[in-house]
Amino acid sequence: MRAQSSATATVPIAVTADRKRVALGTGQAALGVAAFSLTFPATAWGLEGFGPWSLVAVRSVLAALIAGGCLLALRVPLPARRHWPGLAVVAGGVVLGFPLLTTLALRTSTTAHAAVVVGLLPLTTALCSALRVGVRPSRTFWAAALAGAAAVGVFTVQQSGGALTSADLYLFGALLVCAAGYTEGGRLARVMPGWQVIGWALVLCLPLTAPAAALALAHEPVRLTAHAVTGLLWVAAGSQFLGLVVWYRGMAAVGIPKASQLQLAQPLLTLVWSVLLLGEHLTPAAPLTAAAVLVCIAVTQRARG
């Protein structure tokens, strides 16, 4: 009897430890979503003092220095040669393509408009992932994905006066390259910690981004205002690296499906920041479309499960 009591007494302890781990992981994933939701407002601030090419290049260099320092401090070995092509895809999509295309778009687009369009990213990533691994999603998945895409398409055309603008084309291009980078990064995260995936991708780009930063700074005017410096530091340290660190740690603790549910709030959070930090005025279509996309993503999540 005594042995049985001792054995059963360990069950509540294990359950409590598991709940604490899940709570901590949920908090970390939520911090990651909050960091990502500030990316567009911070980019808009950065564009007040930097040119688009300077902002993207310097952002990548600063993030690479932070990531490289962490990799060196922890003595992380180089990835196996077979992983470098995948890291190149991550670098091209997440480190270079998405930041550059969205920054170019935000020169003429509001952050609210960009947030609604890029709200399709989870759907685009799911489609890219299905093609990459050869999975056949259900009809419900495809219907919800197409409904979300249609909602954003109607919103974009309506907000642009009946025709797509260059900013819209940049944003749609950003969706495609980032989805490819996320998909390949998710595959690599099965064999190495997620923060190392983005860390090595940043370091891989350094020989390109360092001279690009020097060249851009020499040709684009720079005004070191408080907004510009704050925006640059945030997109470099917060969005490009630290946000991904807590995001991947959270996913490891609570699982990808549950973490993905938290990311559904990201476009709506960006709309809030665009009003509070930038003073933008939202049209009724923006939050309504963002909510419609949120519902469609939630349906695809359930359909995939």
Image (cartoon, rainbow, N blue to C red):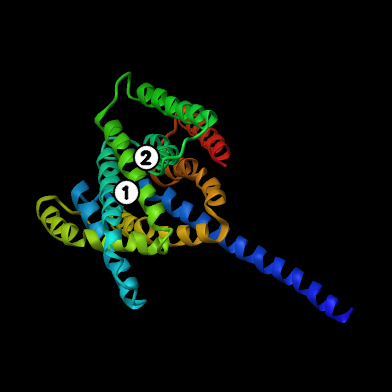
User: Where is residue 27, by image quadrant?
Assistant: bottom right
x 46%, y 56%: residue = 32
Tell me: 251 left or right of 181.
right
Q: 7 or 134, which lies in front?
A: 134
Residue 63, visible in the rendered structure: no
In the image, 93 versus 156, the foreground residue is: 93
Question: Residue at (29%, 21%) from the top-left corner?
Answer: 163
In the rendered image, the vertical position of residue 184 relative to residue 147, given as above or below: below
Whole-number angstrom distance, CA of label 2 to CA of label 1: 9 Å
Position of residue 118 relative to residue 193, above or below, is: above
Q: Quadrant of the N terminus?
A: bottom right
**In x, y percent, where is residue 121?**
41, 40
Instruction: Determine whether the residue tagged by mark 2 lies in a helix, strand or loop.
Output: helix
| Crowd rating for badge 1 (residues with CA inside 10 Å; few <14, some 14–19, many 20+) | many
Specify the amino acid type for callout 1: Thr
Q: How far across and down, in percent of the image, does residue 17 sit?
A: 66, 69
Relative side of 144 to 62, left or right = right
- Return the disc, 2 or 1, that comes first in the chain's sequence: 1
Q: Amino acid at mark 2?
A: Thr
Q: Position of residue 76 (x, y in %)?
A: 34, 73
Residue at the spot 87% in from the left edge and 81% down from the top edge: 2
Q: Secondary structure at mark 1?
A: helix
Judging by the rendered image, the residue that carries numbered circle 1 is: 43
Residue 283 in sight from this viewpoint = yes
Label 2: how many Cα within 10 Å (few below 14, some 14–19, many 20+): many
Image quarter in which the C terminus is found: top right
Residue, disc 2:
111
**Residue 212 placement (x, y as % from top left):** 14, 55
In the image, is 147 to the left or to the right of 175?
right
The quarter holding residue 108 reads: top left
Q: Do the CB atoms of the residues marked 2 and 1 lie less than 8 Å apart?
A: yes
